[in-house]
Each structure stands twice: as structure tokens, then as C-alpha cells.
Amino acid sequence: MPGLRAFLLAVLAAAFLPSGLAADPGVGVSLGGIEIADKLKPGGGYTLPSLGVLNTGDEPGDYEVRISYTEGERRLRPPAAWFELEPQRFSLAPGQAQSVRIRMVLPTGAAAGDYAALVEARPRTEGSGVRLAVAAATRLSFSVTPSSWLEAQRVRLNRWLDESEPWSYILPASGLGGLLVLFLLRSVRLIIRVERR
């Protein structure tokens, strides 16, 4: 009886399961992280180290490289528009690698502060349905320095306001409210007279 049960399970498995598992291209990257120690200036253009993307799978695949972000990251997120990735899309045979040039151009209005992002490589998938996505990423971190002393003070104040919420808003609002009351008391005189008739 156990032999018959095993035989029936094997027949059902052969009938309903695909004949072979679909092989997907794998992906790997050559850099563990890109940390720029120099302080970058708004308006500057910077060439970053090239990122090698490797097809670690057993079949050819189409790949793309993009900027993504880590959930819950406290540092600023640089917009993807700041980056030029060349080539951004390409095809690789199994075991083949592609070098991707990364250039970053900071706009003149870039906010000063510490930034973090991921340079992510992933196979491109076409079609509908649910697919398990594989990706590999390199962490990128850098700092943008204020363009002037006044800008540095503004950044310092903004950082303090962000780190000490809600008191950073309550205390200045209370101070302004007190000044408004003092101003009104000095500029508006209230005269009350009591007269007999």
C-alpha cells in the first residue's frame, strides 16, 4: 500500500508541476559601498567609481541599474535625477559582467547635509504575474557642504529643529506669543472710567 501511495503522488506531481524549474538570471555587484569622504559642493559634478554588474545566473538576462533607498534611513535621499548611469540597461550572458559609469551632478540649490542611497542592479522582468525579484546593491553615502556661512547656520538651525521636536516649535512659538502680548500691552491703552450721575 505505501508503494502505491508513493506512485500516485509521483504521477500527480508529474502531471501538475512544470517539467523543469525556470532558471532566472542572478545578479551581483563588484562594490560593497561607495563612501565619499570629501565634502561636496552644490553645483559640482563628480565621477564616482564604476560599478561592475555580474550575471551570476545560468541563463542570459536583461539588466538595469537604478537609484533606490533604504527604508527608515535618517539621512537625506538624493533624487535619482542627480545621477547619470551609463549604460543604465544592458544584456549579459551567464558569467558576463558590465561596468557601469556613475556620475553625480549636484544642483546649485542642493541642500547641505548627509545623504545616503543605494545603486541597485536587478534583472529586468517583462510580462505579468507574480515574480520574485532579485537585486544587488551598493550603498552610496556622501555629504554636501553649505555654500556660505549663512547657509551653514541655516542648516545647523534646521538640524536642531528636526532633532528636538516638538520643543523646537513650542518654545519659539511661546516666545513670539509673549512678544506679541507685550507689544499689544504697550501700544494699546485701555481706559476705563467710572462716572457718577
Image (cartoon, rainbow, N blue to C red):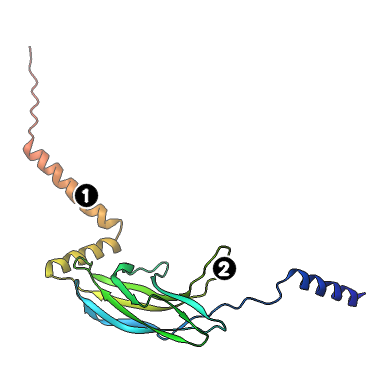
The picture places residue 168, in percent across and down from the top left corner, at: 26, 57
Task: Examine the rendered structure and indicate whether residue 53 appears above or below residue 176.
Answer: below
The picture places residue 45, in percent across and down from the top left corner, at: 22, 76
The picture places residue 119, in percent across and down from the top left corner, at: 38, 76
Q: The residue under label 2 is which amino acid type? A: Arg
Q: Is 195 or 144 nearer to us in this picture?
A: 144
- State the residue position of label 1: 174
Q: Nearer the viewer, mark 2 or mark 1?
A: 2
Q: Residues within 10 Å of mark 2 (few under 14, many from 20)?
A: few
Left or right: residue 104 compared with residue 94: left
Q: Residue at x 27, y 83 (%)?
A: 37
Disc with the residue nearer the chain's start (2 vs 1): 2
The picture places residue 122, in percent across and down from the top left corner, at: 47, 75
Q: Residue furthest right?
A: 1
Left or right: residue 105 compared with residue 119: left
Q: Quarter holding the N terminus?
A: bottom right
Q: Is 161 or 185 nearer to us in this picture?
A: 161
Image disc number at residue 131: 2
Task: Examine the rendered structure and indicate whether residue 23 appears above or below residue 80.
Answer: below
Q: Is residue 87 visible?
A: yes
Q: Residue at x 22, y 68 (%)?
A: 107
Q: Residues within 10 Å of mark 1 (few under 14, many from 20)?
A: few
- Which image quadrant for residue 137? bottom left
Q: Residue at x 11, y 39 (%)?
A: 184
Q: Quarter holding the C terminus?
A: top left
Q: Is 67 or 146 nearer to us in this picture?
A: 67
Q: The residue under label 1 is which amino acid type? A: Ser
Q: Is 34 or 165 nearer to us in this picture?
A: 34
Give the secondary structure at mark 2: loop
Q: Is residue 77 visible?
A: no
